[in-house]
Image (cartoon, rainbow, N blue to C red):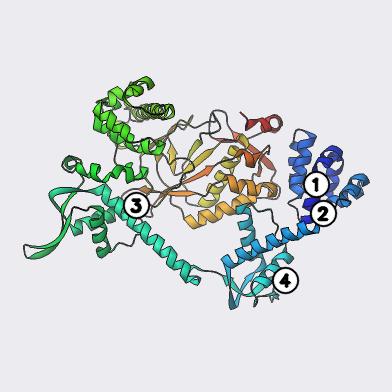
């Protein structure tokens, strides 16, 4: 729809709600091709006349012929008063001009980002339009890329680019832009240099974190340079890190200030050594204990790095003070709880047995902190107990298959990435580790629900994943709840999916990203694509650490955050299949689970009556 039509409808929205007989004109709107059969069904599904008119206006604003087609239908159906009212609405030409100029500058900026002039090169009009429209959808711009507007924008942005018909044997003509090509990373040298500096800095941080995990300063000890190099390479297996001996040496010396680098001859061979450095094994941590105090390593490590230490496979009751603190450290960091609390635990000799029977009043006796933080510690305690119970259930011996249970026993635990937080190059899960969550159903619309999904077949993987994402996301949006879907985690219980096992999934990241973008544009309806883009977060590819595995696996996680300002009182129907005869489908979570479920006609009618109240609960 053009700018004038949108502004006219915006000015008359209240009038249309009070005077438009939508039931009278819907058949004609469909007959004249202004709306589709799917659009008509979604409009009729709304509960009240006001809701139906609101939905109708949202839909036709996204149609290229929406306003003119609407006026024609009003004329056909004899609704002259409404048509006259719209025709008589005055729109300031300056306002229209300013909006056009803003759109032009925006499209010009995107064109310069994506393309450059190149004599003899070309791109098709369809390809360029798809590129620009995808960015518009991603950024939620209220802008339609009609062909004539794009042609003017391209020709005014690139002076040597020509719009012409391509000679082809096909019956239908193909239009292209001549003397233009897509940009590559090599086209912008300054940008490449800046990216290179950023990547180099990131590599140094990754190597430093690996060193802190594997080594510590220890007087009288020594480690050969070759051992440091091989240890770092093993730790960073599968990561594209530029590791050079000269840079590694300087990073080691910067990370551990008290060590000395020297070269000595031993048995006729020259060996490069780091003195006062030791591998950080459990039995050497006492001798290297000053490392933690002087450098405060634990405050610098990310929660994912701290999770790399295996959790003792013994009951919480038998944890020593040190065991307990090591388990709680990453959980405290994730919850924003100061690690000084753990020092107080040690002073007051709080071991696993005492902590298991802790109450919030007990915390008040040893630490002075806000109630919210104390409650967070109690939640962590409850989660630890649940995890322990889950492992005991999994490890429960079977009289029929004792060998199988012994081989498949899961004793390592991981903590899931926190909702709506970024992952980084050091983020990883361990193969066969156990993860747990108590948020597998809707309960407060804030804490995310989690769905664990395993995939065994390598064929059509991206298509299968993207369809699952659309189903899960639309259920989150309809139920107004945050959620995360995890691909590559096997659910260990059918009823609640509280427990899962890290198995990983092998997938091409670029293909997966492209498939997600395409499926959102297809499965969601045109008037709701922008909302879907804003609610569905980009995927996180979290590496799965395992030995002798090729190709490498990862867990793919997608967060969905249907903010109330975006969802409003919308019902989010999706196309069930990629066919023209597919009908709009409304999905919600099956009661007590995080499994999307198709709603029948009666369920849809009930939902339409209560959807506007969901976000207020």
Viewer-nearest of labels 4 and 2?
A: 2
Measured along the vertical axis of the image, is residue 469 above or below residue 142?
A: above
Q: Give the residue pinned by disc 2.
A: 91
Q: Earlier in the sequence, mark 1 or mark 2?
A: 1
Question: SS class of the residue under badge 1?
Answer: helix
Residue at mark 4 to residue at mark 2: CA–CA distance: 38 Å
Please tell me how crowded label 3 is: few (under 14), some (14-19), or many (20+) other residues with Cα within 10 Å: few
Whether pointer 4 and pointer 2 mark residues with C-beta atoms closer than 8 Å, the reply is no
| 405 on left or right of 120 | left
Image x and y of residue 134, in percent: 62, 57
Q: Residue under circle 4?
A: 173
Which label belongs to residue 11? 1
Marks 3/4: CA distance?
A: 50 Å
* Location of residue 42 in the rendering, given as x and y in whole percent from the top left corner: 73, 41
Q: Earlier in the sequence, mark 4 or mark 2?
A: 2
With 240 as the anchor, is 524 left or right in this view? right
Q: Which residue in the structure is indicated by mark 3?
A: 549
* Above or below: residue 391 compared with residue 57: above
- The residue mark sitting in front, 4 or 1, is 1
| CA–CA distance in space, label 1 to label 2 | 9 Å
- Label 4 crowd bin: few (<14), some (14–19), many (20+), radius 10 Å: few
Asked if the residue under mark 3 is in contact with the one under mark 1, i.e. CB atoms within 8 Å, the reply is no
Crowd tier of the residue under label 2, counting other residues whose Cα lies within 10 Å: few below 14, some 14–19, many 20 or above: some
The quadrant of the rendering that contains the C terminus is top right
Identify the secondary structure beneath mark 2: loop
Residue 404 in sight from this viewpoint = no
Q: Which quadrant does the N terminus fall into?
A: bottom right
Marks 1 and 2 in Cβ contact (< 8 Å)? yes
Q: What residue is drawn where x is 48% and y is 30%?
A: 496
Callouts 3 and 2 close, C-beta under 8 Å: no
């Amino acid at each position: 729809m053009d700018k004038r039509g949108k502004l006219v409808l915006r000015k008359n929205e209240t009038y249309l709600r009070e005077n438009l007989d939508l039931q009278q004109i819907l058949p004609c709107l469909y007959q004249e091709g202004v709306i589709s059969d799917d659009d008509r069904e979604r409009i009729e599904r709304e509960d009240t006349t006001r809701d139906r008119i609101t939905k109708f206006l949202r839909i036709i604003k996204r149609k290229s012929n929406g306003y003119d087609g609407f006026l024609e239908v009003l004329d056909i159906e004899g609704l002259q008063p409404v048509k006259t009212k719209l025709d008589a609405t005055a729109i300031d030409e300056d306002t229209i001009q300013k909006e056009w100029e803003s759109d032009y500058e925006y499209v010009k900026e995107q064109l310069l980002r994506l393309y450059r002039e190149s004599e003899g090169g070309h791109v098709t009009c369809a390809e360029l339009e798809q590129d620009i429209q995808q960015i518009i959808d991603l950024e939620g711009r209220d802008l339609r890329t009609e062909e004539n507007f794009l042609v003017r924008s391209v020709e005014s942005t690139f002076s040597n680019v020509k719009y012409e018909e391509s000679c082809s044997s096909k019956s239908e003509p193909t239009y292209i832009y001549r003397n233009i090509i897509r940009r590559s990373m090599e086209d912008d040298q300054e940008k490449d240099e800046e990216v290179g500096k950023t990547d180099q800095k990131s590599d140094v941080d990754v190597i430093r974190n690996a060193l802190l995990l594997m080594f510590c300063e220890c007087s009288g000890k020594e480690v050969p340079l070759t051992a440091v190099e091989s240890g770092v390479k093993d730790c960073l297996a599968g990561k594209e890190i530029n590791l050079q001996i000269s840079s590694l040496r300087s990073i080691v010396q910067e990370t551990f200030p008290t060590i000395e680098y020297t070269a000595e001859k031993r048995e006729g061979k020259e060996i490069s050594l780091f003195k006062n450095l030791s591998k950080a094994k459990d039995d050497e941590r006492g001798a290297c204990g000053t490392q933690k105090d002087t450098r405060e390593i634990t405050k610098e490590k990310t929660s994912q790095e701290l999770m790399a230490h295996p959790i003792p496979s013994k009951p919480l009751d038998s944890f020593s003070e040190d065991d307990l603190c090591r388990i709680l450290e990453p959980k405290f960091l994730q919850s924003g709880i100061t690690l000084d609390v753990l020092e107080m635990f040690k002073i007051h000799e709080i071991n696993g047995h005492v902590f298991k029977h802790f109450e919030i009043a007990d915390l008040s006796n040893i630490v002075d902190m806000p109630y919210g933080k104390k409650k967070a510690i109690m939640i962590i305690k409850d989660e630890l107990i649940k995890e322990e119970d889950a492992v005991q259930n999994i490890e429960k011996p079977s009289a029929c298959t004792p060998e199988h249970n012994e081989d498949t026993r899961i004793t390592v635990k991981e903590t899931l990435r926190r909702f709506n937080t970024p992952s980084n190059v050091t983020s990883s899960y361990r193969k066969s580790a156990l993860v747990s969550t108590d948020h597998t159903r809707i309960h407060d619309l804030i804490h995310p629900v989690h769905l664990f999904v395993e995939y065994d077949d390598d064929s059509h993987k991206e298509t299968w994943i993207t369809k699952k994402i659309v189903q899960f996301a639309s259920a989150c949006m309809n139920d107004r709840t945050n959620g995360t879907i995890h691909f590559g985690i096997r659910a260990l219980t059918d009823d609640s999916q509280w427990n899962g096992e890290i198995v990983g999934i092998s997938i091409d990241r670029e293909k997966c990203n492209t498939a997600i973008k395409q499926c959102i544009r297809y499965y969601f309806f045109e008037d709701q694509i922008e909302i879907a883009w804003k609610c569905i977060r980009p995927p996180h590819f979290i590496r799965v650490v395992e030995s002798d595995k090729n190709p490498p696996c990862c867990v793919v996680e997608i967060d969905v955050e249907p903010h109330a300002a975006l969802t409003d009182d919308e019902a989010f129907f999706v196309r069930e299949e990629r066919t023209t005869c597919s009908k709009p489908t409304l999905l919600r979570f099956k009661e007590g689970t995080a499994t999307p479920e198709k709603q029948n006609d009666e369920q849809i009618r009930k939902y339409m009556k209560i959807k506007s109240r969901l976000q207020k609960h």
